[in-house]
Amino acid sequence: MKSFATRFATRTLFAAALAAAGAMPALSQAAPEHHPRHEAQCQNCGTVVSTHSYQRAAERGSGVGAVGGALLGGILGHQVGSGRGQTLATVAGAAGGAYAGNHVERNMHAQTYTDVRIRMARGGYRTITEQGSPRFRGGEQVRIQNNHIVRD
């Protein structure tokens, strides 16, 4: 019969061997990767869905168109009627010419803008307005950086 000390030592060694054997697989296993895929990482990535281009007139004219229109409208208005009617026609022609000249000048300085609609990789849509003609086509992979679109 074994003594208490021998039984205790055997049990302790057996428990230590089991613990060591149980710990070995945990130490030898590779750590799982915690790096999500590239698409999931990029919060600002997406796919171009559509583009829409349009002209936007200048907000203000320089005044050259208004002055030129007023002169031309005044001259044409002066050709109509006589006396007080002629004066009224001259003033109305100058006012109408100034308005039309300003409108023509603003349209001459119109700029092209393009709305680019993007389906984001994380869900949802964003629309970015760029100055100029379209640079992207539907289906292109892009990234939004500082409110500007960059090809991926």
Image: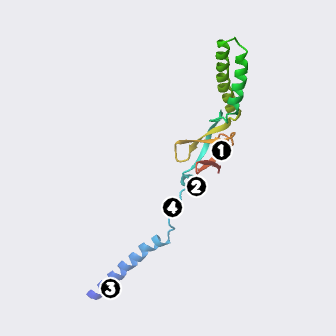
Q: Name the residue under label 4.
A: 34
Q: Which of marks 1 and 4 is nearer the N terminus?
A: 4
Q: Mark 3 vs mark 2: give the one in front.
A: 2
What's the CA distance linking mark 2 and mark 1? 16 Å
Label 4 Cα crowd, 10 Å radius (few <14 / some 14-19 / many 20+)? few
Mark 4 and mark 1 in contact (Cβ < 8 Å)? Answer: no
Above or below residue 47? Residue 75 is above
Residue at disc 4, secondary structure = loop
What's the CA distance linking mark 2 and mark 4? 12 Å
Q: Name the residue under label 3.
A: 9
In the rendered view of the protein, which quadrant contains the N terminus? bottom left
Residue 6 figure quarter:
bottom left
What's the CA distance linking mark 4 and mark 3? 43 Å
Q: Name the residue under label 2.
A: 38
Q: Which of 40 and 53 is in front in this view?
A: 53
Q: Nearer the viewer, residue 73 or 55?
A: 73
Q: What residue type is labelled 2?
A: His
Q: Name the residue under label 1.
A: 140
Q: Which amino acid does label 4 sit on?
A: His
What's the CA distance linking mark 3 and mark 2? 55 Å
Q: Is residue 53 visible?
A: no
Residue at disc 1, secondary structure = loop
Q: Earlier in the sequence, mark 2 or mark 1?
A: 2
Q: Mark 2 vs mark 4: give the one in front.
A: 2
Above or below residue 18? Residue 130 is above
Residue 135 percent coordinates (x, y):
69, 43
Residue 36 percent coordinates (x, y):
53, 57
Q: Which amino acid does label 1 sit on?
A: Glu
Q: Nearer the viewer, residue 150 or 86?
A: 86
Q: What residue type is labelled 3?
A: Ala
